[in-house]
């Protein structure tokens, strides 16, 4: 497609979501012809746009509480910018569920350090 022929839909699909015509058609249960029509300016249905965003790891859920969370390369990006692996998330949940005295003390210390680091980052901006 030539530069002067690029529509917002084409840019969204190809550049932002990095999906091919075929991948988009399969994802949205549409034909390649329908996706080509979107690329020329026909409106993309909202549910298809959401699927494309989710697939591109740009959106986890439509609920605003998840707005600052992203998936990047097999890791979850937290609102703090930290990338965590699935194992780290499971470990954190397990530690919270154990609730032994030692873990609670360690958790309190970790939270204090995390808050202090967060404040330092905010002050340096």
Image (spheres, grey):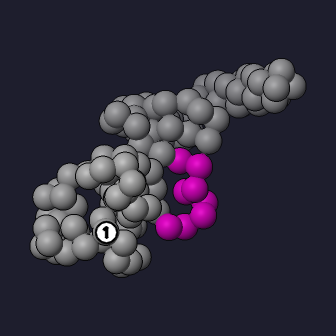
Q: Which residue range is magenta in the image? A: 62-69
Residue at 34% x, 34% y: name it. Answer: 73
Q: Is residue 27 left or right of residue 94?
A: left
> Residue 5 placed where, x, y %?
35, 58
Circle 1 — which element?
loop
Q: Quadrant of residue 125?
A: top right
Mark 1 is surrounded, within 10 Å at the Cα level, by few (under 14), some (14 to 19) or many (20 or more) other residues, namely some
Q: Nearer the viewer, residue 10 or 116?
A: 10
Residue at 54% x, 67% y: name it. Answer: 63
> Residue 10 placed where, x, y %?
34, 58
Q: Nearer the viewer, residue 70 or 23?
A: 23
- Residue 95 in sight from this viewpoint: yes
Question: Disc 1 designates what residue?
Answer: 40
Q: Quadrant of residue 44?
A: bottom left
> Residue 98 placed where, x, y %?
50, 39
Residue at 26% x, 52% y: name it. Answer: 1
Q: How many marks?
A: 1
Above or below for 116 versus 50: above
Q: Quadrant of residue 25?
A: bottom left
- Residue 101 in sight from this viewpoint: no
Question: Can residue 64 be found in the magenta stretch?
Answer: yes
Question: Can residue 49 be found in the magenta stretch?
Answer: no
């Amino acid at each position: 497609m030539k530069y002067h022929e690029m529509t917002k839909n084409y840019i969204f699909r190809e550049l932002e979501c990095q999906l091919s015509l075929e991948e988009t058609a399969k994802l949205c249960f549409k034909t390649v012809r329908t996706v080509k029509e979107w690329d020329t300016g026909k409106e993309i249905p909202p549910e298809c746009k959401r699927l494309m965003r989710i697939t591109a790891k740009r959106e986890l859920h439509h609920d605003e509480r998840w707005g600052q969370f992203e998936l990047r390369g097999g890791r979850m990006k937290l609102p703090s910018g930290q990338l965590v692996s699935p194992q780290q998330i499971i470990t954190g949940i397990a530690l919270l569920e154990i609730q032994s005295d030692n873990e609670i003390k360690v958790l309190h210390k970790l939270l204090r350090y995390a808050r202090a680091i967060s404040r330092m980052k905010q002050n340096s901006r």
